[in-house]
Amino acid sequence: MKPSAEEIAQRVDAIAPTLAANAEACVQARSVVPESMKAMVEAGLFKICQPARVGGYELSLRIQYDTITAVSQVCPSSGWILMVMGAHHFCLGSWPERGQEEVFGEGRNGLVSGTLAWQGKARAAEGGYRVDGRWQFCSGVDRAEWVILGCADAESGGPGVHVVVPGEQIIVDDTWHVLGMEGTGSKDVLAKDLFVPAHRAIDTRELMKGSSLHTLKHATNVYRVSADSILSGSVPAAILGSAKFALEKFVERTRERRAIATGARKAEHGPTQLRLAESMAEVECAQFFIHDAAELMGKVAQSGQGATDMGYRARVKWQAAYAAELCRRALARLFAGSGAHAVYDSSPLQAAFRNVNVGAQHASIDFDTSGELYGRMRLGLLSTQG
């Protein structure tokens, strides 16, 4: 039986103390620690987007996004891994049934890391493909059982196939030394002449459009939503959690702060009050855009027309990019008004500032290209037909 949104929220509340207690340990380890992964797995959070036919919950994107935000609010590293793996578990709904069974069958957790960007290359071989390359930003690869790899066509260089491979078949290169989101362990992976059977591969265009024939074999039409839309909408949900955390910490700290020169309470300072009000409005607007995008994709799923009516993709991508930008602006304003103590590594506001800015760099929500794409669509310069 599928859990309700309320039950999922209760599960998050139950494991929140564990995730919060381990948040700094994830940062220091530059990877989500096993105890936090175990808590999320046992709470069933990685099953939210997993197909029901292979033991998942197959719930709405709104539930997935709200869960990502709630987890990110207590541990940004854990929330980011839930976001990435959840999106990949969604993507597996487009794969051949045999591939889905290998990853999730017989009650297996799956736990799929990787990257949807086609950074490697694949060439056709008897019974499947030969894959080579290096892939960056494989969040959670240290805790993954499987890895998705996007591959360009070795001959043309254009979109080719996406493959899913066992984690032990790839090489992990620890490149993850970064400004923020350290605990996501988003390292590089490499593969050399790796054979992947055809049932663990899917045409990239079909995946991105939601047009795979395998999406028709599920209990719902949710997997008819394009993969790039689900990922774009997921990213700001994680960023939003860090932004909400920062608002809480700013309020706590401001209630205690006094101006050094006069001793006046910062909480009674008009510009500080305005700074908080404006930042809160931006974060609330970001949440609205994320929820609206989730509802839009939900309507697409209900209609089952996601693979033919593609206009929603530009809107989702832009709303996701703008939501992330609103969180980034809010954090910049709060950080600037937090005084010199905010620069210390021990400051939670400093950590949130770094995490939001790093998260907002994700390629799927690039502000400039997403805005241009949406503008072209609204001006009638972009075809919305699949």
Image (cartoon, grey):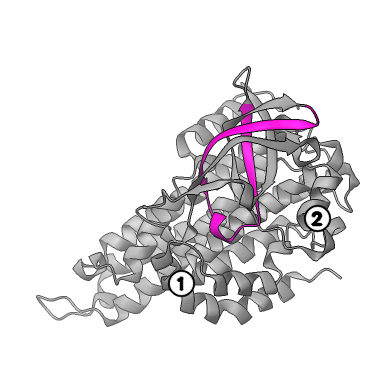
Percent from the top left, x then y, of residue 343? 24, 64
Other residues around mark 1 within 10 Å, as few (<14) / some (14–19) / many (≥20): many
Depth check: give the residue in front, 20 or 242: 20
User: Residue 261 bears which disc, if any?
Assistant: none
Single out the residue that lies furthest toward the left.
Answer: 261
How much space separates mark 1 and mark 2, taking CA atoms? 29 Å
Horizontally, is 170 left or right of 31 in the view? Answer: right
| Mark 2, other Cα within 10 Å: few <14 / some 14–19 / many ≥20 | many
Rendered view: 9 above or below 223? below
Q: Quadrant of residue 304?
A: top right
User: Which of the pair 44/382 is nearer the observer?
Assistant: 44
- Residue drawn at point x = 56 percent, y = 75 percent: 35
Query: Does residue 247 appear in this view?
Result: yes
Residue topped by disc 2: 51
Give the residue at mark 1.
23
Residue 133 among those drawn in magenta: yes
Reply above or below: 210 against 41.
above
Return the x and y of residue 348 as percentages of the image width and height: 35, 70
Label 2 secondary element: loop
Part of the protein shown in magenta = 126-152
Left or right of residue 194: residue 361: left
Residue 92 x %, y %: 75, 48
Work out whether residue 86 or residue 61 is closer to the camera in this orientation and state it: 86
Q: Is residue 140 visible?
A: no
The structure residue drawn at horizontal position 54% and vertical position 79%, both measured from the top left corner, is 18
Q: Write the residue at 78% across / 57% down.
A: 104
Which corner quadrant holds the C terminus? top right
Q: Earlier in the sequence, mark 1 or mark 2?
A: 1
**Quarter that holds the N terminus:** bottom right
Q: Where is residue 27 in the image (x, y as percent from the top left)?
A: 41, 65
Amino acid bearing label 2: Pro
What is the magenta segment's predominant secondary structure?
strand
